[in-house]
Amino acid sequence: LVAGEARGKLVLFESIEEHTMMQGSGEGDGDDKVLLVRHATGDEEVSASGDGVRGVILMQELPHLSHLAIRARQEGVVFATCTSQDEIGNLVENFVGKYVQISASQQNVSVSLSEASDGRGPSADASGAGGDGAPQNPREESGGRVELSEIKRATSLSTVGMVGSTRDTCGAKSAQCGELSTLSASLSSFSVPQGVCLPFGSMELVLDMQEDRGAKSKWQEGLETLDGLLRSGDTDKAALEKTCEDVRSLIASLDVPLDFVEQSVCSHFAAGDRLIARSSANVEDLKGMSGAGLYDSILDLEASSPASVAEGIKGVWASLYTRRAVLSRHKAGIASQSTACMAVLVQRMLPSEYSFVLHTEDPILDQGSERFVYAEVAPGQGETLASGTQGTPYRLRIEKETLLVEILAFANFSNWDATELKYTQRPEDLVSLGVTLCELGQKLEHHFGEPQDVEGALVGGQEGAEQLYLVQSRPQL
């Protein structure tokens, strides 16, 4: 998933989250490590799991464009998968607890015993680095800090149409969706689900409206406590987790005015629509900090029920304060948790037959990546890909100049009969989809002026023509 070389002590965990929860216990903190992990959801963030992680070997297949794989690539962590029980048994029996070197390339992965060292080998090439000893990483190039733009917080409770969203009022995701919606009118090759945004500052305004006049002060005190714990280096499970949980519980208990939700949000949709509330924070979808999967999307809300939609909105706000999100922002060099601000994009939920993730510059190739686009396609909702459902999606590599499509893998998921999937039955349709995605990807790359990480869906019956929707396009990392 991420090529390169890394050295460290091979340590076995059931999950990356298990390693995260051990941080602060004093056991191996800060040591160079290669994690051997049995399971992953695809939403984890390696850097937030603790210092010293130089590589990960995962005992399951994972989509190359899952949130976890994207973040590992962004953070310069060598990442490989292994499903051979013989190889896993060999690693557990002969290498766990010892210092190893992992060498990963597109062709193969090898693990050998090594002396204790400074972690990354001299030829590490994760994220496209050369031979200078460390992966290239947008955070490292900027001195380890992500620069945040100035934002404007709303002064009254209101919503903004998706097309009217701007980065400084509604975040990059909402603004980009608005721009995609405008662009779809001229390109006519895709659509964007309709939506409306609660801008930055909405949560703070709702805090001010509470019967408990001290609600906002409690929230501010919680953020100050988080800052103090992070500055002191006291990131142990008990203190940090409790403070994060207290802040999330406070947000979840808020009374959001239901008449406002009904008039300013629900009225934009048909009564029978199912909705999704999506994060659009000022600390995601940025160069050097994608935040992919770091904040929650709340699915299957009822457009006819303001209470359902209000719960979804609060769920997105509260996800700003998970332990993983707090640690991720701290690792990115964001000095204060009060800097993070969450807008919420509410959109019509798509009845997706297939979902896809498209990178307009192939992230897998070591050389010539700019000549190809790379796509992964899976049945169902986008979470199948983004959150790393176990299995293999359709994998396509398409050459931009010739539109030549190479099918790298056919889908194989335990919860679908792969032989019944239409792209397995008719590979020629999969090739046609690859051509469509390549042409669209090049147009988006040209429009936004840089490689794009694109998410979308195909909606339509087995027999009818599918309609292609885009739900996101952000800078590719």
Image (cartoon, helix red, strand yellow):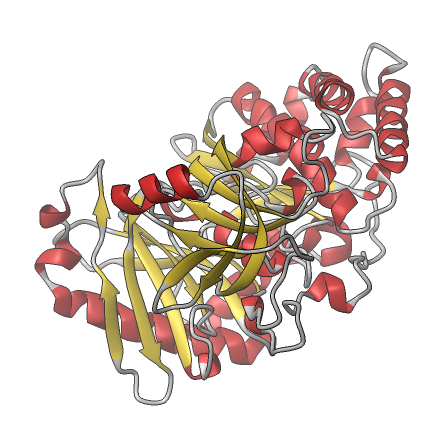
Q: Position of 150 compared to 370: left or right?
A: right
Residue closer to the observer: 275 or 72: 72
Residue at horizontal 75 percent and vertical 47 percent from the top: 331
Residue closer to the observer: 210 or 130: 130
Residue 473 placement (x, y as % from top left): 53, 62
Quadrant in the rendering for residue 157: top right
Tell me if I can see residue 177 in this picture: no
Quadrant housing the N terminus = bottom left
Q: How many marks?
A: 0
Residue at horizontal 64 percent and vertical 52 percent from the top: 116
Residue 226 placement (x, y as % from top left): 83, 29
Q: Position of 210 compared to 446: left or right?
A: right
Residue 437 placement (x, y as % from top left): 35, 70
Quadrant in the rendering for residue 26: top right
- Tell which residue pokes out farthest to the bottom in this image: 401
Residue closer to the observer: 11 or 436: 11
Q: Position of 283 compared to 59: left or right?
A: right
Quadrant in the rendering for residue 60: top left
Q: Is residue 400 above or below residue 477?
A: below
Q: Is residue 157 above or below residue 69?
A: above
Residue closer to the observer: 368 or 234: 234
Quadrant housing the C terminus = bottom right
Q: Is residue 14 above or below residue 50?
A: above
Residue 177 placement (x, y as % from top left): 56, 57
Residue at horizontal 72 percent and vertical 22 percent from the top: 251
Q: Position of 380 compared to 235: left or right?
A: left
Tell me if I can see residue 43 in this picture: yes
